[in-house]
Image (tube, rainbow, N blue to C red):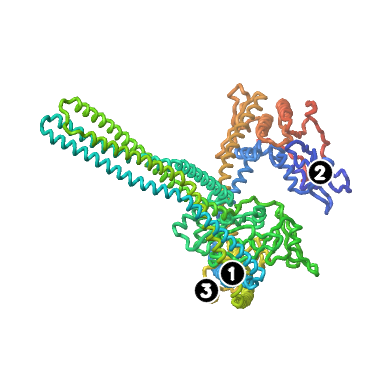
Amino acid sequence: RTHRARNLKDLVRKEAGADCSGAKLRVTLLNRGADGYRHDVYGDSITVERVISLRSGGFNGYKLLDKDGKEQSRSKKDLDSMLDQLNIQVENPVAVLDQEEAKKFLTGKPEDKYEFFTKATELERLDRCYASIADNVLEQKVTQERARDNIGGAIERTRALKKEWEQFQELDKLEVQVQELRANYGWSLHSEFSGELNDEMKKAQKFGKKLEKMRAELTNAEQSLNVTDDEEIALKNKLDELTEEANQAAEAKTKLENDLKTSLAPIKQKERDREVLSREHAQAKKAHKGAVRRLQRAREEILKSQGNAKEEERARTRKIAQTESDLANAKEGVDPLKEEIARHLRDYQDVEPSVGQNKETREGTERQLHAVQQRVRAMQAESGEGSRALAVFGSKCKPLYESVQKAIKAKKFKGPIAGPVGMYVKVTTGKEKWAQIAETSMGHGALDRFIVTNQADLKLLDKLRKNVGCHARECAIYRIHPKSTKEKYDVPAPPDGVETVTSVLNVDNAMAFNFLVDHCNIDTIALSESKEISERALLMTHGSGKQSIKGGKVRKVFFLPNADHWEVDKDGNRIMIGNDRGMKEKTIGVDRSKAIESAKHEMKAIQQELARNKSEEKAVNDAAFKSKKAWNQAQKEHQKLVSKIKKMESVLDELKAEAETSEEVPTIDTTEYEADIEEADASVQDLKKQEAAIAEEILSLQPGVKEQKKQLTEITARNKKILDDMDKIDAKLEDIVKGQNRRQEQVDKFRAKVEQVEGALEQQEGTVKEVKVKVAEALAGARRMQFYFLRDLKMFDLKKENGGEIPEGQEVELEPTEQDLEEIETFEPDKDSKHYKTRIQNKLKKIEQEKERRNVSESDPAVARDKYFRAKKDLDSKVQQIEAIERNCKALHKDIKSRRKRWRDFRRHIAEMTNLNFDEFLNKKGSSGEVQFDHEEGRMDLVVQKDNTDSKSQTNDVKALSGGERSFVTVSLLLAIGESLETPFRVMDEFDVFLDPVARKIAMNTLVETAKSMEHRQFIFITPQDVSSLKTDPKLRIFKMKAPARSKTVGGAQQQTLNFGD
């Protein structure tokens, strides 16, 4: 670059002699602050060492040394990274200005100056970079279009391979369907065997019940046969006692009859006397009426005899006669009214005590009914009855239960449905302490189950579950065999010393009970108060050291207080399992069904009694009201009649008084007749008093007679019972004496029937065991087929979702474990085994036909899948590349557009700042100037006014200036352009060779002042001129080099100088 040598080796000074191996040039840079380059590796300084080797094989290149001079790198890449990090621009002509660049700048055309400006400000490099990027974008677009044209064949091939692979997938789908049919075939066999087992168990139960009945009859017959002489003697003694008691009762009855006859004699005599008085009373009334008639006839004769002497006297006499007749009739009505009043009063007095008594009885019955109702409600709350208690089994149980009930009313279900299961489960009375441990032993997710019997009901119930918002684990559905809906399974009684879940819980629904047996195995779970008690009652240790559980079907044993449990595995080892979570919260209610039923019966009886009490109370109240009303009415009539009699007597007295004072007196005397009437009336009254006295005497004798009649009734009933007991004992004695042979024949007959039923039961139990083995084998096979179906289905779905491959970490177990099989729930298919067997055969035939029909080039599905996915992967890769190119082109185009705009903004700003700084630097010499830019034409012109006070000194041609003026203008322009640079180094070589002393001094001072003001940059000025006028200080250092050795050879390296000629 300096043109002082042909290569780097010629720059090595020869004074070192022939043994000189080369030269090293080192430049040490500070490496501090946030902008430092890899400070953790190089430290506070970096040394760049350039090695120039004169010997072949020696190292020629750069080294990067840390602060301790230790080599860290020889990579040119690291060197470029360090220069870029520190913004050192070695190729920038303003940063490093040599004589060639200065000459080109001074003597060049405006276009050259503009090129110098763009190169110095990095604008040219950025412009080239943007142009290169634009070319790359066009090339990428061409590449994209070419790639799009070339992937057509790949697309068609991929489609063909995909179609071939999908055909194999359809065959896999058919294989999964076959596996599902095999699973359904297994479940249908299990269902059929379960139905057969259910039928056989029912037969066994019938035989068992029949055997129990026959054994009871045999026991009764044997007991009847084994009657001893002592029993016969005891019966005879009992008969003698009853005979003696009967004799005593007969004597007591005879005595009571005689006493009653004696007590009735005075009453009968009084009644006879009353009958006599009644007849005399009737005769006296008749005599009274006859006297009244005679008096009436006498008065009529008086009237006739007197003629029509005085009309007034006759009228008075008729009026007196009429009044006396009315008075007599009225007085006759008084006694019947008095008797009626007395009778109504007696009726009211007889009824009135019953009114209060019936009211008290009715109120007592109401209180009793209220107490029973309260007791029923309390027992219902304790037992958890009612839909409101369903929430304990889950928040969705109640709304789902209500939806199910609505669907049942709408007749949407085809078969019976039950649920939730917990609604039917109660704790047996007296076994409340086992409730929590029994519930814990059943596990979770059992009590909120709903049970159906067919697929249609299962789908409908699942729809109802979704409607009420049930999650996957809430209110699950269990499908049970239709034959298991009518009767509960026959489960064994608990072993001695322990309880079982079936003995603690009472399930009043056959579907719920059979579900708990099938799903939760409640008939195999024993419950105990402690571990020790359970081990003593159930654990057996054999001579071989193996252990087992007594108690038939018991498989697990739970014990208080924490519901821990133990069991024995197949190898005969006891396993203890702790319950760290504690017992579940109690949700099962206490079984109060019998007590509630009894209380309801009692409540019904009390309600009937209350209705009867109310009816009786109403009848008594009505009778009392009627009697009282009649009594009051009779009293009113009596008072009215008495008032009327008094009024008639007053009128009669007045008429008689008028007759006595009258001048005319009757010629016939009626005093005798009137005396007869008074005598007859007195006789009637006397007879009434005698009748009333006799009635009171009879009434006073009645209580004693009633008591005797009551005693006689009791003794008669007692005597009848004694006679009945004697008849029974006589019948037993006769049976003992005469029926011995008959009973022996009956016992033999019963014994033969028992033996016959025992044989049939034993044979039936053997059949049940055989069917149970079939059921167990069918269940195991069905579960295994179900596992294979679920396995194949899962593998099919995984392959379908993941491109024919099973992702890593989601591998499927090929063979089931015992636990896997146990966790598979039973399933009830809709069809029988023949249906599924036929469908399996048809499906297999269809698979073979599909394999023959499909025209596929590959017979191996794995090879077809690999071909398809390789082609798809290749196609996807190409498509992704095309899409990536398109995205990159769009992003680059957008980025270039943005960067071009900012580049123009930067160019304008740098040009403006360069113009201002250029004028400022010229002003220091008393000149002024302007830099004119034409960015479109790529020109930069300088306008210089040598005297800033004289406009005539302005010139547009720099060449018209003297050499010193041009050099000063050059320095000013370089400094102005440099103000826009951020490079830390500025090097200027022989910048002042053509300056006159004044201009040189001004230029030098300007450069030094400018350099000192920019402490963050380092300026290096190289000049052959004398710089003794400059004074050194901490910011200015002067280095003077030895004169170079000049070559005397013609054509050798010479000092390059600038030619500022015309």
Marker disc for residue 835: 3
Number of the label disc, if any, that sits on residue 717: none
Q: Earlier in the sequence, mark 2 or mark 3?
A: 2
Give the crowd class for mark 3: few <14, some 14-19, many >=20 residues within 10 Å: some
State if disc 1 and disc 2 touch (CB < 8 Å): no
Q: CA distance from mark 2 to mark 3?
A: 89 Å
Along the viewing direction, whichever of 1000 and 163 lies nearer the viewer: 163
Q: Quadrant of residue 177?
A: bottom right
Percent x, y of residue 403? 49, 54
Residue 878 visible to the viewer: no
Q: Give the percent coordinates (x, y) of residue 726.
A: 57, 65
Query: Where is mark 1, residue-wise?
Result: 732
Label 1: few (<14), some or many (≥20) within 10 Å? some
- Residue at 76% x, 49% y: name it: 75
- Mark-to-mark CA distance, 1 and 3: 66 Å
Dot 1 and dot 3 residues touching (CB under 8 Å) = no
Earlier residue among tags 2 and 1: 2
* x and y percentages locating residue 857 in the rendered image: 57, 73
Residue 331 spot, x, y in % from top left:
29, 37
Alpha carbon separation for disc pair 2 and 1: 134 Å
Q: Is residue 6 above or below residue 326?
A: below
In the displayed structure, does residue 384 sit left or right of residue 283?
right
- Mark 2 neighbour density, 10 Å: few (under 14) some (14–19) many (20 or more): many
Q: Is residue 458 something one can see in this rendering?
A: yes
> Dot 2 corresponds to which residue?
65
Q: Amino acid at mark 1?
A: Lys
Q: Quadrant of the C terminus?
A: top right
The three-letter code of the residue at mark 3 reads: His
- Pointer 1 or 3: first along the chain: 1
Circle 2: residue type: Leu
The quarter of the image holding the N terminus is top right
